[in-house]
Amino acid sequence: MNELNLTLKIWRQAGPDAPGSFDTIAAPGINDEMSFLEMLDVVNERLINEGKEAVVFDHDCREGICGTCSLMINGQAHGPQKGTATCQLHMRKFHDGQEIVIEPWRATAFPIVKDLMVDRSAFDRIVESGGYITAETGGASDANLTPIPKPVADAAMDAAACIGCGACVAACPNSAANLFTAAKVGHLNLLPQGQAERFSRVEAMVDTMEEFFGSCTNHGECQEACPKEISIDFIALMNKDYLKSKFKNRKTLSRG
Amino acid sequence: MATTTVARGKAAAGSTKAKRKAPFPVEFYRSALGKKYVMAITGIMLMGFVFAHMVGNLKMYLGAEDFNHYGEFLRELIVPILPRTVALWLLRLGLIGAFGLHIHSAYSLTRMNHAARTVKYQSKRDYIAANFASRTMRWTGVIFGLFLIWHLFDLSWTGTGATYVRGEAYQNVDHSLSRFPVAGLYIVANLALGIHLFHGAWSLFQSMGWNNPRFNAMRRNFAAGFAAIIVIGNVSFPIAVLAGIVGN
């Protein structure tokens, strides 16, 4: 175990419309085996003991599967370690005496609630618009009743790994949510269970996405930031299905 | 049923019938993804033009007669079927349309992207994948677009100071590019074009949904190779003129 003496520059903002600014907080004696969020817990305890207000940040499961934690750490979403959410990032990735700049996600669709906490409900709007399948009711059908080729199941699982943390939007120079939407679309569109709504899904989810977010210019920054390392290949799949949806849905006679 | 009423743009407008659907291409172009398709398709058209333009200009290495003959041939494209210059004008109209759509989609997507992050990051960003080319597309595009207007004045419309004789293509190229600042401008503009193509020729595959593990690794090589061929070809012309290889 090593001890780190760090200087934190943390974004403090009292509320959604309040002006914010960086607050420099000294964080001496940090155990390098702590996770990044544990480090913030220690800093907050000290702040509380000093009678100051604790830093507000999002966190929940702390095991990299819930997608609640966020944070722009030194200009990178979820910090410097690839394929890792902030909660799984450890202080051994930093060195003694380092200055760490911590900022919230920045996007018009992700308004700041307080300090480092943002409202990511725009993602819920996207999922609501098409992130479901039609399934028969009644008793649960047998597992493996629907044959799915292994590579297809694997690809769908890679997309389904998305935890909806918003790092893709945060990292994107355009604040585009194409990787998130592509992962949600691709996950269901690849599987036989998702075929019934395949084209209405991609149309609805993309249209909802465009109400809130920017557009993709293929920087590839999102897949580098993604804690689940979801590939931008899914964005290409989504684009393909979106074009198809425009042709196919047009032929749906019942649409009037 | 849903009791929450979140007001958000068109979806909450509560009118399913009221809005009349525009024709399919217009409807498609209204979406950002559709604009990216248009950007990619017009990009491919412009890439085809820029490649043919470069290959055509290589004729200047064969001498004045071949070069001017090639220029005349373009006016007489498919002549027995269409009157003189008609085919050329059809190509030009296609090109102008492609430029217009390419620029308009870029403009409106840029507006959309700026609106998507009104408050910028207050600390320095550390980009991992975004490269110089991808982040300067707007600038290289604008620089090359401005150059293009100048280029049309220089060698198609009026000439820019040097002796200009309409129809004497070889001579005009020689006179214009013999001037050092002009040669420099052509080189700078083509480097900007090369940077633009380095990202654009890769990016179009993603926008068009052309993604397959079989050829994914070749997409970047294609873009780099295409950009290199265009830049080397086009930059060679001002250098050749200055070096006296082309010209009288």
Image (cartoon, rainbow, N blue to C red):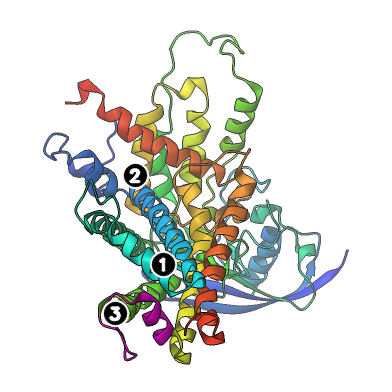
Q: State the mark number for residue B188.
A: none
Q: CA distance from mark 3 to mark 2?
A: 45 Å
- Disc 1 target residue: A15
- Depth check, front residue: B207 or A75: B207
- Disc 3 target residue: B153
Of marks 2 and 1, which one's residue comes earlier in the chain? Answer: 1
Say whether residue B160 is magenta. Answer: yes
Q: Within 10 angstroms of label 3, few (less than 14), some, or many (20 or more) residues?
A: few
Q: Residue at x 66, y 46 (%)?
A: A64
Chain of the residue under label 1: A
Q: Residue at x 44, y 23 (%)?
A: A195
Looking at the image, is B188 positioned above or below residue B35? below
Of the 4 image quadrants, the one containing the C terminus of chain A is top left
Q: Which residues are magenta?
A: B158-176
- Disc 2 target residue: A208
Asked if the residues shown at circle 2 and circle 1 are in contact, with their CB atoms under 8 angstroms apart, the answer is no
Q: Are marks 2 and 1 on the same chain?
A: yes
Image spot of residue A109 (x, y percent): 39, 57
- Amino acid beneath label 3: Phe
- Amino acid beneath label 2: Thr
- The answer to which quarter of the image holds residue B229 is bottom right
- Depth check, front residue: B179 or A151: B179
Label 1 element class: loop
| Mark 2 vs mark 1: in front | 2
- Depth check, front residue: B196 or A151: B196
Image spot of residue A174 (x, y percent): 44, 61
Describe residue B144's horizontal placement relative to residue A43 as left or right.
left
